[in-house]
Amino acid sequence: VIGPGEVCTHSYFLIGSFDDKEYADNFDFKNVDISSGKNLSSMFAFIGSEAEEWSFTGLDQLDLRNATSLYSFLHGISDGDYIRDIGTLNIYGTDISSMLFGCSGIKGTINIYNNPSDYGYGRSFEYTATAPGSEIIVNYTADVTNIDNIINTKSSNSNVIKGELINN
């Protein structure tokens, strides 16, 4: 477990699942340094999904530029009972499969900078932003040639919206 203020220099990280409200309420992402991480698969999967008032303070300040795999990165972080605001995440990885899978109560913006491989985006937005008040806007660069396919991984009742073309 990487706690507040700790720096991890490994290429593979996993914080995993915690539903302890006291710990979750005091967790501040802006004090976690994962800038050297390449494989961030399942790093925050199910984290805080049961903690009622848990916020994502600093999540949008994570440096993800070196992350190549964000497979199941935030998988299941919100079951829809509470809306989690993730702010704006800048995604550079080429494997974003299941990145927000099952995050029914989530809102924020995802900026995708690199084109995921043909196998690297499956289920990215399945069951994402399905709860009332949830919404994910997905902006993208000109390098992302398969943006429509990525957006189409959403469920029929997902509020995942194709955003706008952004600069690198």
Image (cartoon, helix red, strand yellow):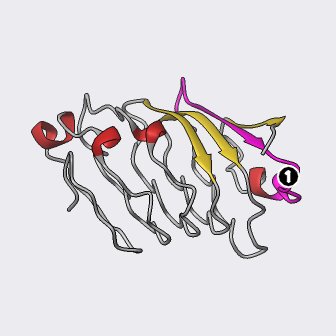
Q: Give the magenta range.
A: 130-149
Image point (30%, 51%), residue name: 47
Does residue 59 sit above or below 133 in this rendering?
Answer: below
Q: Is residue 116 visible?
A: yes
Looking at the picture, how far across and down is residue 136, in whole percent? Answer: 63, 36
- Front residue of 132/13: it is 13
- Front residue of 132/98: it is 98
Does residue 43 sit above or below 118 in this rendering?
Answer: above
Q: Is residue 16 visible?
A: no
Looking at the picture, how far across and down is residue 124, in whole percent? Answer: 63, 58
Element under label 1? helix
Could you classify mark 1 by the number of other residues whose Cα lies within 10 Å: few (under 14), some (14-19), or many (20 or more)?
A: few
Q: At label 1, which amino acid type do we have?
A: Asp
Give residue 160's quadrant in the image. Answer: top right
Image point (37%, 30%), residue name: 82
Q: Quadrant of the C terminus?
A: top right
Q: Which residue is mark 1?
A: 148
Image point (19%, 52%), residue name: 3
Give residue 84's quadrant in the image. Answer: top left
Image point (57%, 62%), residue name: 98
Residue with the most extreme top position: 133
Q: Is residue 88 left or right of residue 152?
A: left
Looking at the picture, how far across and down is residue 85, in whole percent? Answer: 46, 30
Give residue 132's quadrant in the image. Answer: top right
Q: Is residue 63 left or right of residue 27?
A: right
Looking at the picture, how far across and down is residue 67, in whole percent? Answer: 54, 64
Q: Is residue 121 left or right of residue 17?
A: right
- Front residue of 69/159: it is 69
